[in-house]
Image (spheres, rainbow, N blue to C red):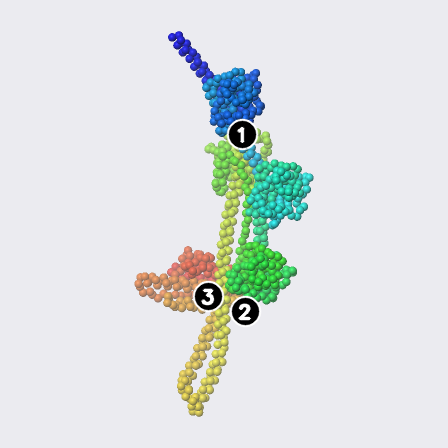
Amino acid sequence: MELNSNFTENSLLLSGVQLQEQLEQQKALASVIGRIRESLDLETIFQTTVIEVRQLLNANRVAVFQFDVEKDWDGEFVSEDVEPGWNSAMAVKVHDHCFGEQFAVHYQQGRVQAVADIYEAELSDCHVAILSQFQVRANLVVPLLREKELWGLLCIHQCSEARNWKESEIEFIRQIADHLTVAIQQAKHLYEVQLQAAQLAQAAQRDRVIDRLVDEIRLPLDIDTIFKTTTQEILKLLQADRVAIFRFNADWSGSFVAESFAEGWTPLVGVQNAIADTYLQQTQGGRYVNNETFTVNDIYQAGLKDCHVSLLEQFQAKAFATAPILQGNTLWGVIAAYQNSSPRQWQSYEVESLSKIGTQIGVVLRHHELLTKAQYQAEQQKTLTSVITRIRESLDLDIIFQTTVTEVRQMLQVDRVGIFRFDPQKDWEGEFIYEDVASSCTSARSEKVYDHCFSEHFAPLYAQGRVNAIADIYQEKFQACYVQILQRFQVRANMVAPLLKKGELWGLLCIHQCDAPRYWQSSEIEFASQIAEQLGVALRQDSYLKQFQMQAVQLAEATEREKAMERQELLATTVDKIRQSLDVETIFRTTTQAVRELLEVERVAIYRFNSDWSGKFVADSFKDGWKPVAQAQPIILETFEDTDEDDKLPRNETFVPIRQGETLWGLLVAYQNSQPRYWKDEEINLLAQVGVQLGIAIQQAELLEQTKRQTLELTQALQELKQTQTRLIQGEKMAGLGQLLAGVAHEINNPVSFIFGNLIHLNEYIKELLNVIKIYRQNDSLFPDIKKQIDKSDLNFIIEDLPKTLESMKIGTERISQIVLSLRNFSRTDEAELKPVDIHEGLDSTLLILGHRLKNNNERPAIEIVKEYGNIPLLECYPAQLNQVFMNLLSNSVDALEEKFKNIHYQHLESSTLCPKIPLNIWINTQFINNQILIRIADNGLGIPEEVRSHIFDPFFTTKSPGKGTGLGLSISYQIVVEKHHGHIKCSSKLGQGTEFLIEIPSGN
């Protein structure tokens, strides 16, 4: 019993000791974990850990060993706690060549090594020697892993004697190692985050410098100024000895066009005419074509060819960095930074900055090219307008052609511009009839030209309006006959545009470059085509020239927006709300409410300045219990000084400016009414950023409103242009109709006049013949054969009918003469200016032309014309235009009467009833009252509804089916009466009764 009691007591004592040890271990482990969490400094964590572990395990040394990743398992102790009397292991380099073979794999798998006695553990001699160096007798080693890679070792050394390591001690150390692994991983992440933050800060600084430089080089339009500014700024940014811009020639040689260099170095610009780099010439730009940069830290160590090194030595360069300059997709040149004093290790961000600047220079060059091209096209359009204006100032072809060739040659800077005319009597033979030629070239005027190949190869294309542009007559595959003709006139480059007259090829507009080849630009070809088209109009001597529409080319220079820094989440939300609307009231309401919520203030208001710097609150947002200020009367803010001391004192309000561009528009004010408040810098900065965005939003809203107004104005202008264009076309058609009628009348009048004039003589001749026959008949017994023939021919009937036939012919020719006179009165092509005429003649001529529509036909009975002509004086007017008005009104009346008859007749057909007689009448009444000539044209048609009548004079308004009307007849009539003759035209109508048009024209017009 006593033995059992002692055993039980010993067991209990042992269990208590073990529990006490485990408790101490857990306390130490918790302490280590707490220290790890309290600090992210790895050195502090290691030092705390080795002290705690050594005290707990009562070991002679506890140390952290770290491997050198650059060497094969070399390393050193980076932290330790060692009992006095034993040597320190710190700062001692350790290399165990057996480590990789025996232990590395096991440690990477998390294996723990516990050695009770190094001399009894069968370790390798090299390993024992290393441990003996640190006085180690017993050794406990736990691996420290980072991302599954062996980072180091946690070593517990017993130096005084051998030691059997307990399982609890091994497990404790393993747990400590696990938490150290976590600390190592955290330290790595912290280092990476700090490194990324530093890199981002550096990148932001570089971006700010580059953005400022981009803004500076985009301000001027002068390329030399841009190059100078760029090289100076890059020289400062990179701290280099020279920054230069190199431009390529067509053969891939080149020259320096701009540079900036430090004091003591010789210039490169203007020293050499052309620099030839054989590599760039052979590869046509080399790597730069692919938008690649090229850096050399030391020209003597980079493996460059001798010729390349020699060229760089001429530039005094020992290191360089280059980036391409691409103008669109074309390699324009290179921007280069040179270090002349010594080699230099170029950093990636420096090369990136150089590349960004090269890109921006390419954008500026592209914009400059587009601007120059636009200016050239604008000059072309200006010249074209000038030529068209001169064409319209005269109808004399001599003046038109000579003016045109002079203007075109000056504009295009060519050697010869000529007008070639085909002889209509010969097969494609012709001559130059006008030209303007440089003094160095021979004249081609009056030279007869015949090209037997022309009709086969060129005539069909020119007849279709094709323009032929030849850059070099010797580089194209032309037949020998054509080349010989061009050589005759010293032509090297040729551009030819056809001159068409009524659809037929009349001649050619020829533009010659004699001294060298010339590659014609598309704008020049288009320019020549337009000139040829206008000359075609001049050939027809059209009195109604179509107004030329100028095309305005608007170039929007693409600008790089500044990279916005990351804003606070609440600020971004506020700005987004501001930008969701372009309505100023909505923007104000959204902004004030959002800012009040952001800053947690009692009121946010927007104050706007007037021109005299008084102002008023235009919007506010406030908490419940406060009154609005937006409807208050205009006020003037008291002047005060804003000092640094004021910022440190509590205030009830803070405000920031709202700028619209460079102009101070107003203030954004935040109020804390209940008590003073210490405004923080971030709150004021937040308010300032909102003020900037608010100014932009106000400017955008006003620009939107301005754009809407401009869009409306452009739409109205385009509509007016379309109307004018269509009116001109309609006028041209009517003018053509007048010319046709005049031509027909002229052609008919000649033979009729001949017949009518000869009828008088014919009547006298027939009377003489009848007298002779009468004498013959009195003596017919003397001539039996004649008597026999007279009896056979029924001479009595012929003698009786022949005078009647002559009288009928006379009446017929008189009727034809009347018709011809009416046609000439209607067309009046020779009366383009004001002239006194008889209005009744115009009305009668119009009725005569419409006579075929007034007669009865298979579809309706005849239309009766009732004339009520008054005694009116001659009217000074444009006769042909006024006749056009009569034609439009009478034609509409006929259409209305035909529609009326068709409707009534169709109704009776549907009801199967007999259709009564339907009177179809047109009344024409003229009066002279109060120096006004009144002309009424009325009909008894169906009438016009009021909603239609109010629009009948609008352009393009028509109630007719498609294809039967353009909607321009009454619009043009209104223009002729009101604008040309300063009169009035009115329409009155009643449904079912008819319509009446009243024309009033002043007699003193």
Q: Which residue is mark 2?
A: 425
Q: Amino acid at mark 3?
A: Thr
Q: How many numbered circles does the render carry? A: 3
Q: Position of residue 786 (x, y in %)?
A: 43, 88
In this view, 808 is above or below 772: above
| Residue 684 drawn at (x, y percent) | 54, 33
Camera-nearest label, 1 or 2: 1
Q: Going from the N terminus, do you reach mark 1 or mark 2 first?
A: 1
Quarter of the rendering occupied by the N terminus: top left
Disc 2 is placed on an element classified as loop
Q: Position of residue 429 (x, y in %)?
A: 56, 67
The residue at 37%/67% (across/down) is 858
The structure residue drawn at horizontal position 60% and vertical position 37%, both measured from the top left corner, is 346
Q: Residues within 10 Å of mark 1 (few under 14, many from 20)?
A: few
Circle 3: element type: strand
| Residue extending farthest top | 2
Q: What is the distance, in whole Å, between disc 3 and disc 2 at their CAs?
A: 53 Å
Location of residue 384 in the rendering, given as x and y in whole percent from the top left corner: 57, 57
Q: Which residue is mark 3?
A: 926
Which dot marks residue 191? Answer: 1
* Cα distance between the residues tagged 1 and 3: 105 Å
Residue type beneath disc 1: Tyr
